[in-house]
Image (cartoon, helix red, strand yellow):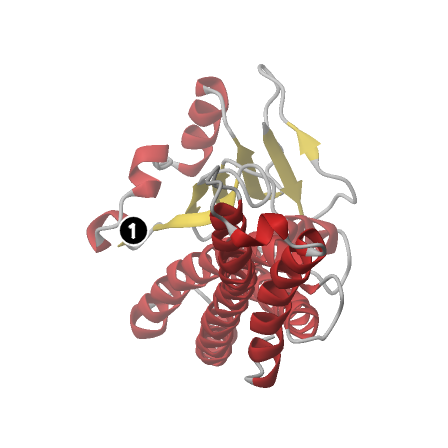
Amino acid sequence: MLTIYTRDSNSPQVWQPGVAATNAAIWFDLINPTPEERDHADLLLGTKLPTRGQSSAIEVSSRLRSSETALCVNIPSFVRTEGDQGPLTPLGFVLTPNLLASVRYADSLAFNSVAASISTTAGPQNSAAVFVALLESIVNVGADRIEAVASDMSKLSGAVFSDSRNHPRLLRGALFKVGAMQRQMTQIRSALLGVSRVVRYLCEGAPSWIDAKLRARFNTIQVDIGSLSEFDQQLIDRLQFLLDAVLGFINNEQNDIMRVLTIVSVATVPPMILAGIWGMNFKSIPEYNWAHGYAFGLTMILLSMVLPLIWFRLKKWL
């Protein structure tokens, strides 16, 4: 889909084959574009849009290219196709003095936010301003997601370190939640890393046709990413500690189960020995002729079970 945003319209236009785009267009947003949509955007840009393979490349020469008339930027890892389950998709930008084209393959809250602001008077009014606003929005959305993960992690930590009766049952679900948080942090870190490399490149040598005020905002974005990276590292450390704690609690639960089974097996060994002795078919066993031999046998079997349990209790093994 090719969506066209203009500076003189309150609503974007979805391009249809055979319909020419208005000269007031400042942003072409392509999502899973068709060959026809690519060709139309290439014609208006005067340069080729990056393919998905080019956007996914990790070498610097494929991610960042600049000339006097166009700036080509690729972010290999941007957002997932299916929430937290699908693979990370790439993002590509082509910026000219008059037009911005973005090529992506999944929906994004950052893009939706900028798209909603274009129709307002305070929103970006040219292609470079839209480009900077998109980078800022990506960082802002990343910050919101980091805060959401931090909140979920605090709740999970409180549940893991609680003394609830459902604690053993909670631990299994906690492992899945920790895994989901790890996937989210990986997604956020990959996206911010891609934006950081782009912004660092632009801070050192942005095209001259980008306004000085906009170039100054690149430095602010870089500082924000640095702060988020520090906070992200703290969350990674907390997540690792939480994972170790969950695994430790699971091991303790397993040890408790094994301890109970061991005690049960030890407590039942003496009765089995006595039952085996008195169960032999020898006529010379004297207890067979006792008047209260049966009661004596049951009493000894019970005592052989109770005495080890009392011993374990005194040793505080139970």
Q: Is residue 292 visible?
A: yes
Against 39, residue 273 (above or below) is: below
Position of the N terminus by quadrant: top right
Residue at (76%, 51%) from the top-left corner? 119
- Residue 43: where, in percent of width, then height? 42, 29
Against 19, residue 74 (above or below) is: below
Q: Of residues 109 and 189, which is closer to you in this image?
A: 189
Q: Quadrant of residue 202?
A: bottom left
Position of the C terminus by quadrant: bottom right
Against 113, residue 280 (above or below) is: above
Q: Of residues 37 and 249, which is closer to you in this image?
A: 249
Q: Is residue 47 left or right of residue 103?
A: left
Q: Is residue 127 left or right of residue 114?
A: left
- Residue 110: where, in percent of width, then height? 62, 54
Q: Of residues 240 and 230, which is closer to you in this image?
A: 240
Q: Of residues 105 and 62, which is closer to you in this image?
A: 105
Q: Is residue 95 visible?
A: no
Q: Residues within 10 Å of mark 1 (few under 14, many from 20)?
A: many
- Residue 116: where, in percent of width, then height? 74, 51
Q: Quadrant of residue 3?
A: top right
Residue at (66%, 44%) from the top-left corner? 6
Name which residue type carries label 1.
Answer: Arg
The residue to which callout 1 is attached is: 63
Number of numbered discs present?
1
- Residue 161: where, in percent of width, then height? 65, 75
Q: Is residue 210 left or right of residue 22?
A: left
Residue at (54%, 68%) from the top-left corner? 249
